[in-house]
Image (tube, rainbow, N blue to C red):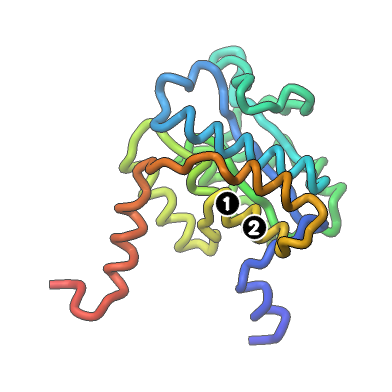
Amino acid sequence: MTMGAAKASLGRIFPESSILFLCDMQEKLRDRILYFPQIVSKAARMLKVAQMLEIPVLLTEHYPQGLGPTVPELGAQGLRTMSKTSFSMVPPLQQELDKLPQLQSVLLCGIETQGCILHTALDLLDRGLQVHVAVDACSSQSEMNRLVALARMQQSGVFLSTSEVLILQLVKDAAHPQFKEIQKILKEPVTDIGLLGFFQGKKNSLLPNSRT
């Protein structure tokens, strides 16, 4: 493995070579998606930090005629919205991605995990980009589909993180001039959204004699 490949495999992220994707957090999905308020809250703090660090943000809505507009609590009112019917965000955002030759990492939030998030992640990997999914900012209507999709993405090379892990990776240093403001955002309470068992299970699968 070359030095460059070794560094790439670490999954480090930098504001100047990253972009935030916000996927399909829409009104008609509000009552269908598991943990919807918590998911949107974590995506909203990703958006706040991205704007503070001048990281580009791209937002999509899936078939808005049927699923409605983006929910206001995401705080994305000033962003341009791209409508789509494809499960992947990449086709409608192709031109925007082509304008960013320095791009290396995509931070991905939204719904649904087994649909638009998975398809988007695979398309981005195909382009040679690193993909970092904020698992606390993604969900589905089905817990099984959600968890299987997370495992499927990880098998393909996606980095699974939380919003806080990603934000701290971007900031890197408590001496960062905006750290105090970002720290206030991170002080919001963290609640269980059904993922502790998923990661505990993956941990146990690595232990000796964990299989009978």
Is residue 52 visible in the rendered image? The answer is yes
Where residue 100 appears, as percent x and y from the top left, is: 84, 51
Question: Pointers 1 and 2 in contact (CB under 8 A)?
Answer: yes
The residue tagged with tag 2: helix, strand or loop? helix
Number of numbered discs overlaid on the protein picture: 2
* Amino acid type of the residue tagged 2 in the rendering: Leu
Residue 212 or 173: which is nearer the viewer? Answer: 173
Q: Position of residue 20 (x, y in %)?
A: 70, 45
Q: Which mark is residue 179?
A: none
Among the 4 quarters of the image, the one containing residue 159? bottom right
Q: Is residue 76 above or below residue 14?
A: above
User: At which x and y percent is residue 156?
Assistant: 50, 62
Asked whether residue 103 is in view, the answer is: no
The residue shown at (62%, 50%) is: 123
**Which residue is painted at 33% across and 67% down in the image?**
203
Within 10 Å of disc 1 (Cα), the crowding (few <14, some 14-19, many 20+) is some
The Cα–Cα distance between marks 1 and 2, rounded to whole angstroms, is 6 Å
Q: Which residue is mark 2?
A: 168
Going by the image, does 23 lie left or right of 17? left
- Which of the image's four quarters has the N terminus? bottom right
Examine the image and state in which quarter residue 175 appears.
bottom right
- Residue at image mark 1: 164
Q: Amino acid at mark 1?
A: Glu
